[in-house]
Amino acid sequence: MAKIKWRGGALLSPVPPAMVTCSDGEKDNVLTVAWTGIVNTIPPKTYISVRPSRHSYKIIKESGVFAINLTTKELVRSADTCGVYTGAKVDKFKKCSLTKQPATEISCPIIEQSPLALECRVTDVIPLGSHDMFIADIVAVDVDESLIDDKGKLHLERAGLVAYAHGDYFELGKKLGNFGFSVAKKKKKQ
Ligand SMILES: Cc1cc2nc3c(=O)[nH]c(=O)nc-3n(C[C@H](O)[C@H](O)[C@H](O)COP(=O)(O)O)c2cc1C
């Protein structure tokens, strides 16, 4: 494949367009964050990178908590709306008809319509340039019980999750394999 060299840019794709909830104790807010990911397994740690100019920035910095709510195809319009309006002017829960659900370990709500929420407590704030990176412990995970089978297995593939790639939203589609499938031994035909 012949390649054209560009200067460095934030072109990792796909990334999750996460709906991040936060609260100052009086008002709750949601902002959409694509600069997020997992940075450690034990203890489970995540990050969100937020521009200091965002209304949510001060709320998260002062409260020390936030929740990452996964976006589904039913939520994608709301996720976009939460990424273009500011909570300084608009109640985005109301505007998007999002239902607040209490988190179990942190003081801000999660989104009832989201199938999975990560409750996060900030441990470090790292200024990087345009964005500050909030590194956080994932202190609880709230999962829609309809996605868990009777053996306790989580079926996230049934949630209709959405990916974000270079400005566009996509619904996750066809399963291509599972962890380790490339080295798994084939079952012998009988
Ligand atoms: C798909 C998408 C991804 C976004 N990712 C980020 C991000 O990673 N960090 C960030 O600071 N803003 C991001 N934004 C922009 C904020 O969500 C947007 O400025 C929002 O209005 C901020 O809300 P607030 O002022 O209520 O905090 C994104 C917006 C969209 C639509």
Image: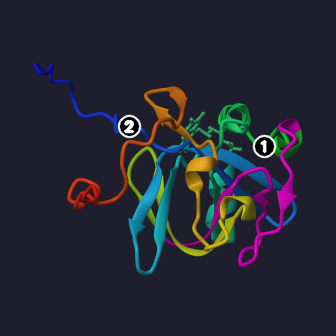
Whole-percent x and y of residue 56? 67, 52
Residue 55 belongs to the span the image colors magenta: no
Q: Which residue is mark 2?
A: 13
Front in this rendered view, residue 151 or 59: 151
Query: Position of 182 compared to 137: left or right?
Result: left
| Model colouring | rainbow
- Label 1, label 2: how far apart the Cα atoms are: 30 Å
Tell me whether circle 1 and circle 2 mark residues in contact (CB < 8 Å): no
Q: Which residue is mark 1?
A: 88
Secondary structure category for the residue under label 2: loop
Query: Position of 45 compared to 18: left or right?
Result: left
Whole-percent x and y of residue 86? 73, 39
Task: Find the magenta span and give its range.
Answer: 95-124
- Residue 134 visible somewhere in the drawing: no
Q: Name the quarter showing ligand 1.
A: top right
Q: Quadrant of the C terminus?
A: bottom left
7 relative to 174, above or below: above
Residue 119 belongs to the span the image colors magenta: yes
The local crowd at label 2, few if under 14, some if 14 to 19, many if 20 or more residues have their Cα within 10 Å, is few
Secondary structure category for the residue under label 1: loop
Identify the amino acid type marked 2. Answer: Ser
Front in this rendered view, residue 182 or 4: 182
91 relative to 76, above or below: below
Whole-percent x and y of residue 152? 62, 73
Identify the amino acid type marked 1. Answer: Ala
Pointer 1 residue Cβ closer than 8 Å to ligand 1: yes
119 relative to 94, above or below: below
